[in-house]
Image (cartoon, rainbow, N blue to C red):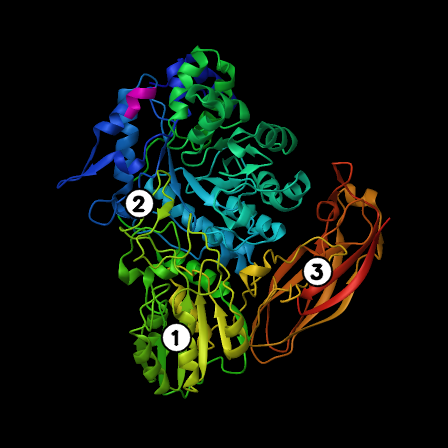
Amino acid sequence: MVDSYNEIETISDRVETLLAKMTLKEKAGQVNQRMYGWEAFRKTETGYELTGKFKEHVRFGDGIGVLYGLFRSDPWSGIHHENGIPENESAEVANMIQQYIRDHTRLGIPVLLSEECSHGHQGLDSLITPVNLGVGATWNPDLHEDLMSAVAGQVRAKGAHLALVSTLDILRDPRWGRSEECFSEDPYLAARLTEAVIKGMQGEASDFIPEGKMIAVLKHFAAQGNGTGGHNAAPASIGERELREIHLPPMISAIKSGAIACMAAYNEIDGIPCHANGYLLNQILREELGFKGAVMADGCALDLLVHLTQSQEKAAALALESGVDISLWDNVYTRLEKAVEEGFVREEKLNEAVRRVLTLKFKMRLFDHPFVEAKSSQNKEPRDKINLESARQSIVLLKNEGILPLNKDTKKISVIGPNADAIYNQLGDYTPFQHEDKVITVLQGITTLAGEAEVAYEKGCGIRSLDTEGIEKAVRLAGSSDVAIVVLGGSSARNFDTQFDLNGAVVHTSGEEEMDCGENVDVADLELGGHQLQLLQEIMKTGTPTVVVLIQGRPHAIPWIAEHAPAILSAWYPGQMGGQAIAEVLFGHVNPSGKLPVSIPRSSMQLPVFYNHKEGGFKKDYFDMSGKALFPFGFGLSYTEFKYENLRFSDQTIQSDKLLAGEKFKIIVDVTNSGDHDGFDVIQLYVKGKCSSITRRVKELKGFKKVWIAAGETKEVILELAAEELQVFSSQNKYELEKGYFEIEVGNPVNYLKAILEIG
């Protein structure tokens, strides 16, 4: 057993004391996360028991460094309500795991339990929030910090310590199936929300993680959102400047906020897989950016390195030398002991990884408090309220020709479409099995708020099914209604017919599934699948006023809908409370405040279409199509109008030495709500360098504030620019604050004020 420690010893002292006692076998065990956690237990008629497979895994490394997915539930794991661990029994099973390791290993080193928390926890009875694209659409880091704090509190109470959270991927090609896991196509917005994740889940940076908090493992480092052709895990064909300008900012901000764990990405950059990229993980991440934490491998990724080395031992050595500290499901790191013995890697290199793993355990106070208190019940009301507010603010009003909010005198409302009453279709990938009464669909939300109006429902068609049998009934219903709410989009819902890879990604579908998004579900065509567009077109022929609601995990190309539908809402995958939030917006109980975190293209054929492309002399339009997005990044309508006036600066010119010394440049604008609805506005600040050693982007988001403004009220809004926002990775391959002029835009993409400032 681990000896007790003096209170005045630092974490580093305690790590070194323990490391000195460890054998090579025990060290190798601490960097392994080999088994699937749901295979560690078995549910019996009287409770739970640990499996022989788990006990063998403990014997293999005389302990376990990290155990993944003890509470995971989904079709891949095969864990559901009958054979899984409900919330109120989670602490019991987590404590069983810790007790067994304490009793059956020489040193009794506690195990870290890691869990998927892409949008809430992928465990039974968990809070399921809007996916990251929806969170990006809120443009509200403070709200997301509160939401992630609620998630951390729930998952920590279950007994877990590491939350695997997607924050680092920047969406550059919406054909990618994991688009839903990205906050944005923009690095600045993603960075602010990544900071919110760290603060919400871990609390303020300190030696120890506070009670009720846990460690965020940030995914994925780096550039996974830039895969060639939108293919999952495809090479990122980028140079170092693109890497630094677009893909590093979220991690840079995370480190400053106290990040102590991240996950390497599946992709390669310029021919080198991220898991074998010592320049990326050691030189840039650790030496240059100052990251002191642990790097976890992605699922089975280390086994792929055998293609480079032709040996598992050499692959283990390569990954360890390159900076990977913790494995995930691979066989390669089970060969580390032999790799050291055969001289492929020095034991001191293994010691470095073990130090980082042990540091995480000490920061979580696991040696002093390995067990969690089993609580009979949790107060779910506060976290449900935060979840609902996040869903509300994630909804983007793309078009409104006066049809919204819905008229209170409406007598009959038809709710139609494949996403109108399908609980899993509004939750996204990485979702556990649900109790149906815990998810509010659009149909349920509208029915609750409709008052005396009659609400009738028809599915009409599927997401990608070619069955047209239901269209006629849906059209008849719409024709007999005062208004039709047509809920279309996509789905990342998995089912038991899907075939999965060893890492849980979809290999291929049987053809019966309706999913068109999610991990490994990349598409070539961004238009809506199946007969969804036909359904809408037939409904609109009836002349019934029609509102389109899009529930989706990626931006779909909707040129016909944008031209013909009188009202369009984009709701992404809005989580368990999404149906209520959508209904509240439709009826005007909530004024929509979401802004697009990603550009919506006209067609897959115009990609890439992200807003912050490089300036240059090339022609932006195609001969046969506009090069502009259908709806631009940052766009979103409201039920009220906001006016921007009196743009001014703290100084017209600011000296570079003052900026480098920490002084900030203030931009001030007056914002007036000139309509008759109270509401949020998102004031956006864009910068474009006019003098530079490199080609600049047409514009770059460098600041924003979400502000509540009552009808008729004017508020003074102050935005700030610091050296970090104005510097570039120059032609000398270093970060520099170059003197010259900057063009400033304040407002939103279609309504803004413009000015010039100078750095002297």
Residue tagged 1: 535
Q: Name the amino acid, label 3.
A: Ile
Residue tagged 2: 76
Residue tagged 3: 718
Q: Which of marks 1 and 2 is in front?
A: 1
Task: Residue 223: give its label.
Answer: none
Disc 2 crowd rating (10 Å Cα; few below 14, some 14-19, many 20+) is: some
Mostly what secondary structure, the magenta segment?
A: helix
Q: Is residue 319 shown to the viewer in this render?
A: yes
Disc 1 crowd rating (10 Å Cα; few below 14, some 14-19, many 20+) is: many
Q: How far apart are marks 2 and 3 (CA)?
A: 48 Å
Asked which secondary structure carries label 1, the reply is helix
Asked which secondary structure carries label 2, the reply is loop
| Corner quadrant of residue 671 | bottom right
The magenta region covers: 57-61
Q: Is residue 274 above or below residue 668?
A: above
Q: Is residue 3 shown to the viewer in this render?
A: no
Horizontal arrangement in the rendering, residue 629 relative to residue 157 (left or right): right
**Magenta-colored stretch includes residue 626:** no
